[in-house]
Image (spheres, coloured by chain):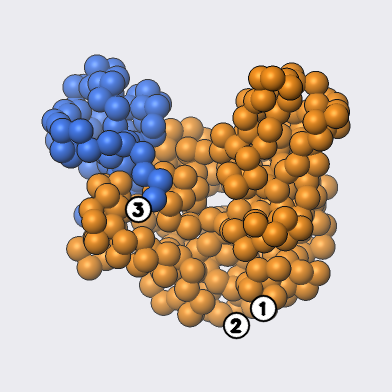
Amino acid sequence: MNTRGVLVMGKIKIKIDYTICGDGSKIDPRECTVCLKVCEPAIFLLHQSLDFEEEDDRYDPKIWRVTPVYPSLCTLCMECVNKCPENAITIKS
Amino acid sequence: MCDHCLKHGTAGKWYLNAKLYSNELAEELDLKEFLMEQYKSFEAMQVRKFGGFSAVGMGYKMQMPIIGRIVKYTAEKMLHTEKPSRNPFKAEGHIGQVIPLDDAIAILETCVPEGSLIMKYCMCRYMHKGEKEACCINFGIMSEIIDKLPRFIPEPEDSKFRITKEEAIEKFTEFNKKGYIGTIWYGAYPYINNLCACQTPMCAGFRPRTEFGIKSIFKAEYVVENNPNNCQGCKRCITMCQFGAIDFDEKNKVSVIDQTKCYGCGVCLHACRFDALRIVGRKEIPALAHEY
């Protein structure tokens, strides 16, 4: 089985504060995309927020969020935490 | 040849069977509505939960002793299913294969329905990096579907939306020379609707395989062979390979291809100026004949 990422200290938990970024809050992640670009193992994915399906236009959704989908690949480089203009990302390991 | 090709292919390959691209097949399978629903929120597919389980944190799930195997089995079963799909929010029957340039040109020339070719922004690039790159060729009923989804339609400065076969071949060749891997996809088995030019790790189709060993995409019907007599040891092919399948023999100063890692995409051939690389059929090498 070829999985990257080693369970050194247990799971890495990456959290994005959705009251600051995404889900129709202050920042639209589609305009920013900094965490997506600085993450070398491409852990973050940009996608439309699911809970807003009824209010948002499903052909042209406007409410998006970023989710860390592959936290097992995180190298703890902290680039995302440091570069996020709104300090919306926290990482615990 | 692989079982799938035996069942579906003419000329030995499933993706060269023009019937699988036809609008009639798409109508028969009632796929327009299905694909429309799927593409409206395709980016969110990886975070959707099915039975309390989603792709988020896949790496950790795969590392658990028994659960890891169940996860892999379930994911592959869903991707490889040949049953007609009902749920557009699951990636059922959404499987693809790597193809080299010549096969992609054959597909564009002979299999794709007339007047249905479009170029759209690659959804995977957008999801992973927030970048809009117009490198994904769709055909058949997809032109009617993407027409209604403005985020996929390229800006005029990036690309034309509706393209001719010649333009598609020209564009695809350009991407192949840049090192983007050609891949052909079932929209939902058995209808083929998508020819993409992929870059790992920014491809949602490749990642489950390259990161976690889940067969979300199959290796090509080919592998690449290096001729050490022609090879000058310039190493340009090594920088092209996205799978790390090419090593360098320091003593003899030639590139060595690890054919067990080679996906047969053939982009390394564009880097070689000495005619040392050659694409050969996978089944010609006994140990690789069934290794997809």
At 65% across and 57% down in the image, what residue appears? B287
- State the image coordinates of residue A91 (x, y, percent, origin top left): 17, 29
Q: Nearer the viewer, mark 1 or mark 3?
A: 1
Give me the chain letter of mark 2: B
Assess disc 3: are there few (<14), some (14-19) or many (≥20) residues with their C-alpha within 10 Å of its C-alpha: some
Give whichever of discs 2 and 1 has the lower sequence position. Answer: 1
At 70% across and 64% down in the image, what residue appears? B15
Q: The chain coloured orange carries which letter? A: B
- Whether pointer 1 and pointer 3 mark residues with C-beta atoms closer than 8 Å, the reply is no
As drawn, A74 above or below B124: above
Residue at the spot of label 2: B28
Q: Is residue A8 left or right of residue B126?
A: left
Residue at the spot of label 1: B7
As drawn, A25 above or below B116: above
Q: Kindly report the distance in space between the C-alpha atoms of the residues bearing marks 2 and 3.
A: 28 Å
Please name the amino acid that badge 2 sits on.
Glu
Residue at the spot of label 3: B46
At 81% across and 35% down in the image, what residue appears? B227
Q: Work out which quarter of the rendered image holds the N terminus of chain B and state it.
A: bottom right
Chain A takes which shade in the image? blue
SS label for mark 2: helix
